Image (cartoon, coloured by chain):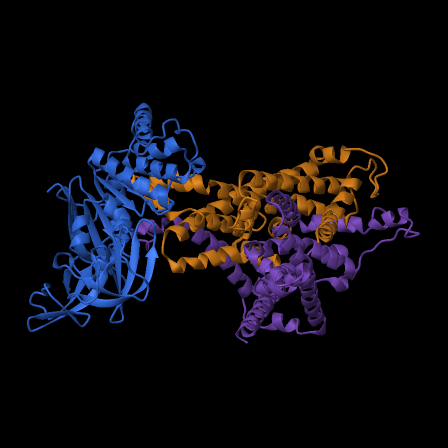
Chain colours: A blue, B purple, C orange
Amino acid sequence: MSGLALSNVTKEFGSFTAVNNIDITVPHGTFVCLLGPSGCGKTTLLRMIAGLDLPTSGAIRLDGDDITRVPTHKRNLGMVFQSLALFPHLTVGENIAYPLRIRGVAKEEQKKRVDELLAMIHLSGYADRPVSKLSGGQRQRVAIARALSISPKLFLLDEPLSALDAKLREAMQVELRQLQQKLGITTIVVTHDQREAMTMADTVVVMNKGEIRQAASPIEIYRRPADTFVADFIGSTNLLEAEATGGAVSVLGQPVSGISLGSATKATLSVRPEDVHLTAPGNGALSGTVTFVRDLGGTIETFVDVAGRQIVAVSTPRARPDVTVGQPVGITLLPDVCVVLSK
Amino acid sequence: MRREKPQKLLDYAPIVFPAAMLIVFFVIPFATMIAVSFFQREQAGFYTPAFQFANYERFLSLFFANVLGFSLMLAIAVAICCVLLALPFTYLLARMSRKAQIVWLVALLSVLSLSEVIIGFAWSTLLSRTAGITNLLVAAGIMTEAKALLPSFGAVLTGMVYQAFPYTVLVLYPAIVRLDPTLTEAARTLGASPLKAFFTVVVPALRNTITATLIMVFIFALGSYLLPQLLGRPQHWTLSVLITDQAIYQSNMPFAAAMAVFLVLVTLGLVALTVIAGRKGEAA
Amino acid sequence: MNGLRNLYFTLIGLFLALPLIVVAGVSVNEKQTLAFPPKSFSLSWYGEIFLNPEWRNALLASLTLAACSAAVAVAIALPLAWFLWRRVAPWANIFQLLGVAPFTLPPVITALGLLTFWATTGFYGQPWTAVVSHAIFFVTLPLVTLSLGFTAIDRSLVEAAATMGADDKTIFRTVVLPLILPYIVSGYAFAFVLSLNEYIVAYMTVGFTMETLPIKIFNALRYGYTPTMASVTILFVATAAVIFSLVARFGDLPKLLGAMAADDK
């Protein structure tokens, strides 16, 4: 099989299990984001793929070859570190040429490749500058070019954009995705930023406590979260307890119609704020009271108290709900936007 | 980088040479010295293996008690003088421009590296009758006649403070540079004058550093060997001088070794006491 | 406050400089007299260091001793510091402690220990024993600067080099060595200058067979005064100042002395 395959990979540090029995396959040319809160094991997983940490058990295969015990320097990969790890004693050009230099590539060949890569990252003519004289975004690009200089089979990035400010980060996300698509290289990025993952990935792998909670396309993850952790971690959502007694379903203790919990008697409903519709009270919906209205210009968030729980509704200025704080309102839950998550 | 335990025998290779050198040329000599301190002295500088406490008993006399007492007193005096002088100096130095700091650091390192011989010679010249500082005072009309200021206790103390001052500054420097400057700024906004802020915020914040520095300067001063000889009278000689005297001129190695071991024990004992006292103070 | 500070710094500066100013003054006396201010001007006592065979030999002995012992000290400190940085081996910290001990204890202890050792092993008085003795006595200096230097190296640089295909040996040559080099140089410089000035260890180990400059000055002092001592003193101060200035010029002196927050002011 072409691509990367992890089977039953586990990593223990003493009695702490950082990565627990993970299986993933990454087909050739896809862009995968490992996403999760800090300490979820995503960086450890990436380091095992790079060979910087060895799994306690399990196997890692690249294009069918078992590379679990192959030392890092023989894996022919490209990696961008969180700190970027640009060599301070080398110039921009020397940094990019480093992987070629230690492989004994001829000087002219090195220079040609460096110029090519510098053109690719829009830094032509920067070869002789010391890395300390670059801006944050430029260093970022140099680190990426350096990792790609041998055209590796596998491109790994550990929180690569975390040092950049918000605006630059968003621009770099787009740039990185476009670069990856142009080169068609298998890429794995570790991030804790769900916007970043949604922007770049073909497949988002959501992790928590060393385990994979869901691996799917960004839109699937957003629309069809597998469990409450994923629903809560990706975007913002309203998690509402639902109960089925006989044929009737109630949410937060209030009866609703049109929603089925399947065979379960207890479940949690995940409703995205943009899917919460405010209506007049009564009307077969949940009834609550408006507690706060946050007008952000581009969007309006309405906070509604329902039986002691806070539900957030987001709407655009065009569909501005005509409500004021203290006003009783109704909330309609449409079955097709409610994701039923069994506990 | 993954820091890991050495896996193969080859991974231990780098430490073999350093470890061998330190064991053969530091641990074994130290052990030899301890062994010799129990040996029997023979004529003409020789000694034979034995196990006797005679060498230790010998300095349980009033004379050696006096020398030991004087050595400790001198080292304590030097440590206190140095810390008193160096603490405000280092504090102010750490707040100067980087360039000025480097100039001062180079000067301090240059003085620190000076041989005791050279420091002794320089101060004996400065305090001498013919080329000394009193000549300046005569020229200025303050004194009527130039005179020698040495040998004297004051000369020994001055020379040793001179020797230990750069060392004190360099020991204090890292801690003081890293001290959060907003601490004093906060104190200033709360109404403390610069001087008051120094004594109520900086000094207490550096209490452990100051204690550690006092100990280090104390040990440094205990090692002074030539200055008491060059600037003082025989009653100003320290244990270091007597050890060398016994080893080289009296050819009594066992006795010299016994005194050296005793000096180590006293040093370590005092350090331990201070550390314990410091811990107790912290707990209170 | 600033006025007070300047006054204090001037006084400390005077305290540090005055003995050297007076020595510089007496070193240019034309006649062999200890007089300040100097009675007449002459640089002949500086020439004396190089022309008089006794002083010249002492100078050469000191320079050779310092150059060799500093090299041995670095050779001990570099692999040790590298090992402690590279490996998880808590037991190896004992060697770090052993490396710092000789410089922390009163020098007379190390000197006497080495004296008994060389006497027992029968090598007493051989010139190379002084090299080893000084290397052990001053190994603390390169050990401290190198340990500091290694902690300043970002470990992800080593990992990055490995992901780019460099094995351990290549990483050491292309990444670790270039980054640690300034610290090797400063460690060597500190050990060199202090060895040049060291008296008691040299005296106890080879004092009767070889004269280093500090031993020569002390011996000369006992027989009275000669202005060459003054000129040698000034030469030594100048050498130390030049070497430490170079260290400051090519390295980060405040950082070397432990100020990790060495920001540009």
Q: Is residue A50 visible?
A: no
Q: Is residue B210 visible?
A: yes
Q: Residue furthest right?
A: B144
Residue situated in front as seen by the camera: A130 or C199: A130
Residue situated in front as seen by the camera: C112 or A178: A178
Residue situated in front as seen by the camera: A190 or A223: A223
Residue C253 lies in quadrant: top right
Residue A119 rendering spot, x and y as whole percentages: 32, 28
Residue A129 rendering spot, x and y as whole percentages: 43, 31
Q: Is residue B194 above or below residue B102?
A: below
> Which residue shows up at 36% across the image and 49% down it?
B13
Left or right of B224 on screen, residue C133 = left
Location of the N terminus of chain C by quadrant is bottom right
Q: Residue furthest top?
A: A108
Residue B168 rendering spot, x and y as whole percentages: 63, 56
Q: Residue furthest bottom?
A: B284
Residue A247 rendering spot, x and y as whole percentages: 6, 71
Left or right of C117 on screen, residue B4 = left
Q: Is residue A201 above or below residue C102?
A: above
> Which residue shows up at 33% across the image and 41% down it?
C161
Location of the C terminus of chain C by quadrant is top right
